[in-house]
Amino acid sequence: MEASSLLNAFPGAVTICNTEGIILAMNDKSIKAFEDDGGADLIGQNVLDCHPEPARSKLADLIENEQANVYTIEKKGVKKLIYQALWYEDGVFAGIVEVSLEIPFEMPHFVRG
């Protein structure tokens, strides 16, 4: 299975941007999640333009300082885990991968030894 098929089979929204904030790729779930904002037409646009303050400044800071960010949100009765991870190409910081995954309101937490 090729990478794009695997990305589209993943149950969460995946959006990838470069170090300038330009959206390079979105899986089908991400395109659908952002269809009111342009969907697939967002590819090639700056991700910073898609965020209001203070989220815009936070994301710009993540890119500038090569930092990851993880949090949960609730919107329209759905709880999501947002994971903004760094990605690298040949060992050089290349941008941010944002994964948005629906999660249950109550879920177990395990501490493993």
Image (spheres, helix red, strand yellow):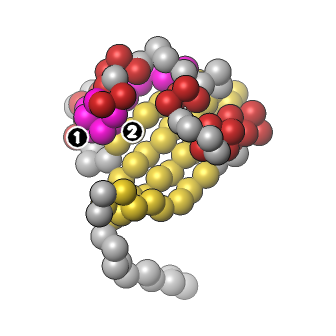
Residue 108 horizontal/vertical position (percent) = 37, 81
Location of mark 2 (residue): 14
Residue in view at x 47 percent, y 53 percent? 82
State the residue at coordinates (50%, 82%). Answer: 112
Residue 59 visible from this viewpoint: no
Q: Amino acid at mark 2?
A: Val
- Screen quadrant of the N terminus: top left
In the image, residue 8 sits, relative to residue 19, either above or below, namely below
Q: Is residue 106 magenta?
A: no
Q: Position of residue 101 (x, y in %)?
A: 36, 53
- The residue beneath circle 1 is 9
Real-space Cα distance between discs 1 and 2? Answer: 11 Å
Whether the magenta-drawn stretch holds residue 31 is answered as: yes
| Rendered-image quadrant of the C terminus | bottom right
Name the residue rendered at 36%, 63% in the picture. 79
Label whose residue precedes the other's in the sequence (1 or 2): 1
| Mark closer to the observer (1, 2) | 2
Query: Residue 16's spot in the image, x, y percent?
Result: 48, 31
**Dot 2 surroundings within 10 Å: few (below 14), some, or many (20 or more)?**
many
Instruction: Tell me where the magenta segment starts and ends, as one range.
Output: 22-35
Residue type pointed to by label 1? Ala
Q: Are marks 1 and 2 in contact (CB under 8 Å)?
A: no
Horizontal side of 52 relative to 105 (left or right) equals right
| Residue 12 seen from this side | yes
* Residue at x 54% of width, y 46% of height: 84
**How many numbered tags mark residues here?**
2
The image quadrant that residue 95 belongs to is top right
Q: Observer-nearest residue: 89 or 54?
A: 54
Callout 2 secondary element: strand
